[in-house]
Image (cartoon, rainbow, N blue to C red):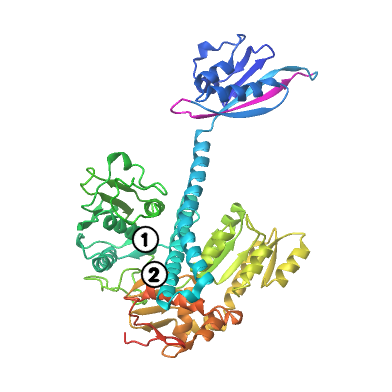
């Protein structure tokens, strides 16, 4: 009986005449009765007690009758209850036999599965809502493409260009929705790595306010920052994303204009940021829901014609909580504006010296230059991408690789793997089987576009598999269970063998033209001192243009260098990615200063004074 009392499940033993032989205290709680109501040796109608609490008695009766019909068999069912605290109960029945194999009765296990069912329902709803969000841009892209393919000769160039621009814009929206979904789910699961740096918060906010003053001239922006604001240790790109989401909301839900106030305060060991608007406000009953994924105010409450995806605030919450902060919203009511606030912990970051985006030391005292917003490590750590589905092995390897002085990213699914490669190129990949794809297939797909060095981790005894991995492009092979010292030695060996291109970039790590800076060593791009997040293809296209700055690069040559010889006729690729690059680095994409078009030939990157 002592064992039964320590179970988290409710436990009952009934003999063949349905009399109670044994029960623990958890069973009384889940059945909603007192211990005095169930006495050992008395007849207990468990079904009746469960039916009395069932939300759907008819369905519950059918399920319990099926469960009770064959006491010699194991069976289970999930019941929806009316109880406010316990809304789902799992009932499991199993036979109890004596020494001679004679059936003595049945055992029952009762489990509260409310959280489990709610989590499953939340996942299902999120997937359904995500599918709904993706349908709109896909339908527009499909419609425009079908129109152009079916009767392109009927449309004049202006109409054709408009349709192509719609396809481009909706493809960007699709890309943004997918990236946002991945961000939310990765942050929730703890697989999203934050790249912490010291951020001069005042400069970051001033830059964002200046951008908003240009894009939303109907609004007045006021920024209040205390003097001598200390640097904040955070991921600058993620925090900028949060601020942009909150500013987007303030502008969108203030359709009549008005004042938007940004205020920063230091409260003990925390930095608090508030963004207040004079817009339509938020009814009190919606305040606790607005950070949920895909949640939107009802149309009668939201007067803005532009409807968001319902993901921005969910991403903001996940990001702030990943930093160890809090985020919340306040509003006096409809028509009285709203205030969104979040906190970030102020942490000592003495190991991260403040430097400008171009690598120069930041001033120790006094004002901070306008182009200084983020701090970076002065020395570049070797980056290793560890693709391993076994969490225990991944933790073990990561700890030792970090001791070796490596910056380690860990992935367990192929989507994470390719998404990370889209954002940065590691120096080395340690590759094992992932949860959804074998290492061999992943390696073959990788080699279609990249020659990043790979050390494959192969299970012992799979010699043929090891040979196939080497033939598919692995640079080295280690069998599991591996000798750690040998594996680390192989990692050090591969990291010493950098490609000639990488060696050349170490000697000339910085490219500058105007306010555009490419830091080859850090694999980062800055515009006016602020980091610009580029995909792998966008970065490759920009660096190709930079390597030939001032020279005209034809469409065919760009295709060959960025996508490969087999793409030398796909000029549309160049148009699309040049358009995306301009939106990210040009102050005015419609009148580019950096990436210049040479009509009917190609493009060139202008050399500008800096």
**Residue 358's image quarter?**
bottom left
Q: Residue at x 21, y 58 (%)?
A: 257
Q: Does the image show residue 5?
A: no
Mark 2 packing: few (<14 Cα in 10 Å), some, or many (20+)?
many
Foreground pick, 313 / 157: 157
In the picture as drawn, the residue positioned furthest to the bottom comes out as: 551
Reading the image, the residue beneath label 1 is: 241
Disc 1, SS: helix
Lower sequence index among marks 2 and 1: 1
Instruction: Give neighbour class at mark 1: few <14, some 14-19, many 20+ (Cα, 10 Å).
Output: some
Location of the C terminus by quadrant is bottom left
Using the image, determine if residue 5 lies above or below residue 588: above
Left or right: 596 as drawn, with respect to 66: left
Kindly identify which residue carries mark 2. 376
Instruction: Check if residue 339 falls in the magenta segment.
Output: no
Q: Residue at x 58, y 74 (%)?
A: 495
Given the current orientation, which residue lies at the most extreme front position? 154
Read off the magenta span: 82-99
Give the answer, above or below, for where 259 lies relative to 102. Answer: below
How far across and how far down the image is residue 124, in percent?
A: 52, 44
**Could you tell me residue 541's position as x and y percent?**
48, 78
Residue 212: % across, % down: 26, 65
């Amino acid at each position: 009986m002592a064992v039964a009392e320590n179970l988290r499940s409710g436990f009952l033993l009934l003999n063949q005449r349905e009399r109670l032989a044994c029960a623990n205290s958890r069973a009384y709680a889940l059945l909603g009765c007192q211990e005095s109501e169930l006495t050992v040796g008395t007849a207990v109608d468990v079904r009746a007690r469960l039916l009395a609490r069932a939300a759907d008695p008819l369905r519950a009766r059918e399920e319990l009758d099926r469960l009770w019909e064959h006491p010699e068999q194991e069976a289970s069912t999930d019941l929806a209850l009316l109880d406010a605290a316990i809304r789902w109960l799992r009932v499991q029945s199993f036979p109890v036999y004596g020494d001679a194999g004679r059936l003595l009765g049945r055992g029952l296990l009762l489990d509260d599965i409310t959280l489990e069912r709610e989590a499953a329902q939340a996942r299902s709803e999120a997937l359904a809502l995500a599918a709904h969000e993706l349908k709109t841009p896909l339908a527009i892209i499909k419609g425009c493409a079908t129109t152009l393919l079916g009767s392109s000769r009927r449309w004049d160039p202006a109409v054709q260009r408009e349709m192509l621009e719609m396809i481009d814009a909706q493809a960007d929206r699709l890309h943004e929705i997918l990236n946002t979904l991945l961000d939310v789910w990765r942050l929730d699961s703890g697989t999203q790595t934050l790249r912490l740096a010291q951020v001069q918060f005042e400069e970051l906010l001033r830059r964002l306010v200046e951008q908003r003053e240009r894009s939303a001239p109907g609004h007045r922006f006021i920024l209040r920052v205390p003097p001598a604001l200390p640097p904040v240790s955070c991921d600058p790109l993620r925090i900028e994303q949060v601020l942009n989401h909150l500013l987007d909301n303030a502008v969108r839900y203030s359709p009549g204009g008005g004042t938007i106030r940004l205020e920063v305060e230091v409260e003990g060991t925390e930095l608090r940021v508030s963004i207040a608007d004079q817009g339509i406000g938020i009814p009190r009953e919606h305040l606790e829901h607005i950070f949920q994924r895909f949640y939107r105010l009802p149309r009668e409450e939201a007067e803005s014609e532009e409807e968001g995806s319902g993901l921005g605030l969910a991403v903001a919450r996940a990001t702030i909580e990943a930093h160890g902060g809090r985020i919340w919203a306040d509003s006096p009511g409809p028509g009285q504006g709203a205030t969104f606030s979040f906190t970030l912990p102020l942490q000592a970051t003495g190991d991260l010296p403040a430097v400008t985006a171009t690598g120069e030391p930041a001033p120790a005292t006094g004002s901070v230059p306008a182009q200084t917003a983020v701090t970076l490590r002065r020395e570049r750590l070797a980056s290793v991408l560890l693709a391993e589905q076994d969490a225990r092995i991944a933790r073990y390897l990561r700890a030792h690789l970090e001791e070796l002085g490596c910056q380690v990213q860990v992935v367990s699914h192929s989507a994470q793997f390719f998404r990370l490669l889209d954002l940065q190129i590691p120096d080395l990949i340690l590759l094992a089987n992932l949860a959804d794809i074998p290492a061999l297939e992943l390696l073959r797909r990788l080699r279609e576009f990249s020659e990043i060095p790979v050390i494959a981790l192969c299970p012992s005894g799979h010699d043929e598999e090891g040979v196939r991995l080497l033939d598919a492009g692995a640079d080295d092979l280690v069998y599991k269970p591996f000798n750690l010292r040998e594996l680390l030695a192989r990692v050090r060996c591969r990291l010493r063998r950098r490609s000639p291109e990488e060696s050349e970039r170490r000697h000339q790590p910085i490219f500058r033209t105007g306010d555009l800076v490419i830091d080859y060593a850090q694999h980062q791009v800055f515009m006016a001192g602020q980091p610009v997040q580029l995909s792998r293809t966008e970065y490759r296209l920009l660096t190709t243009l930079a390597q030939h700055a001032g020279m005209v690069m034809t469409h065919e040559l760009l295709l060959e260098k960025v996508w490969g010889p087999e793409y030398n006729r796909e000029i549309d690729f160049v148009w699309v990615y040049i358009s995306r690059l301009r939106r990210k680095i040009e102050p005015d994409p419609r009148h580019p200063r950096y990436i210049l078009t040479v009509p009917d030939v190609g493009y060139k990157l202008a050399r500008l004074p800096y």
